[in-house]
Amino acid sequence: MIKPDGIRGNFTNQIKRVILQSGFVIVHEMMFQLDVRNVTLFYSEHSEKSFFPNLVEYMTSGPVLVMVIEKTNAIADWRALIGPTDAGKAKVSHPNSIRAMCGSNSERNCVHGSDSPQSAAREISFFFGEISPGIIEHDEL
C-alpha cells in the first residue's frame, strides 16, 4: 500500500518503478479513500496503542493505492525493499529503501507491507475480496 503521504508527495510512479525493477509483478491495484471504520478494521491490532488516533487521522487524510504484488519470496523481499518502519532511521540505515525515499518518520512512513502470508491473505481479502488461493501460495502481498 502506498499511504497518503506517498500519494500526496507524488511518489506513486517512482515507487511502482522500484517495485517493477525489483522483480515484482503488480497483479492488482486500486485507489481507495479510507474512512475511520476501514482504518480501524484494517489496523485493529494497533487499536490499543497510543499512536492509534494519529494513525487513523493520517490514513484517512488522503487516498491510498493498494496493490497485490507477486514474486518468489515476495513478503521478505518487499519488507527489505521498504526498509525500517521509522523512515527517519531508514534514511540512515537503509538509504536506498522506499521509506528513506519518501517517508518522514515512524507514523508517516509512505508504504505498508504485509509481514506474513496470513497477514497478506487478510489484507488482500480486505481490499479485493476473495482472490484465487494460488495468490497466497505464491507468497504475495
Image (tube, rainbow, N blue to C red):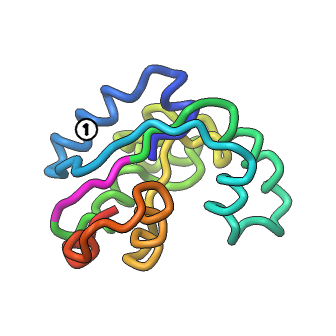
Q: Quadrant of residue 130?
A: bottom left
Q: What's the residue at 23%, 33% (across, down)?
A: 17
Which secondary structure class fits the magenta region best? strand
Q: Is residue 31 above or below residue 115?
A: above
Q: Is residue 32 above or below residue 41?
A: above
From the viewer's perspective, tell me whether residue 49 is left or right of residue 125: right
Residue 33 coordinates in the image, percent (x, y)? 58, 36
Query: 66 or 71: nearer the eye?
Result: 66
Residue carrying label 1:
18
Image quadrant in which the C terminus is located: bottom left
Instruction: Give yes or no for residue 43 being in the magenta stretch.
Output: no
Q: What's the residue at 45%, 36% (across, down)?
A: 31
Q: Amino acid at mark 1?
A: Val
Q: What's the residue at 44%, 57% (across, down)?
A: 113
Would residue 24 be seen by someone viewing this image from the given angle?
yes
Q: Is residue 28 above or below residue 113?
A: above
Would residue 91 be seen by someone viewing this image from the given angle?
no
Q: What's the residue at 35%, 48% (across, down)?
A: 67
Instruction: Give yes or no for residue 70 being in the magenta stretch.
Output: yes
Residue 70 coordinates in the image, percent (x, y)? 21, 59
Residue 131 coordinates in the image, percent (x, y)? 30, 66
Residue at disc 1, secondary structure: helix
From the viewer's perspective, tell me whether residue 32 is left or right of residue 130: right
Residue 12 coordinates in the image, percent (x, y)? 38, 29
From the viewer's perspective, tell me whether residue 50 is left or right of residue 73: right
From the viewer's perspective, tell me whether residue 92 is left or right of residue 29: right
Q: Residue furthest front?
A: 130
Query: Which residues fall within the magenta stretch?
Result: 67-71
- Label 1 CA crowd tier, 10 Å (few <14, some 14–19, many 20+): some
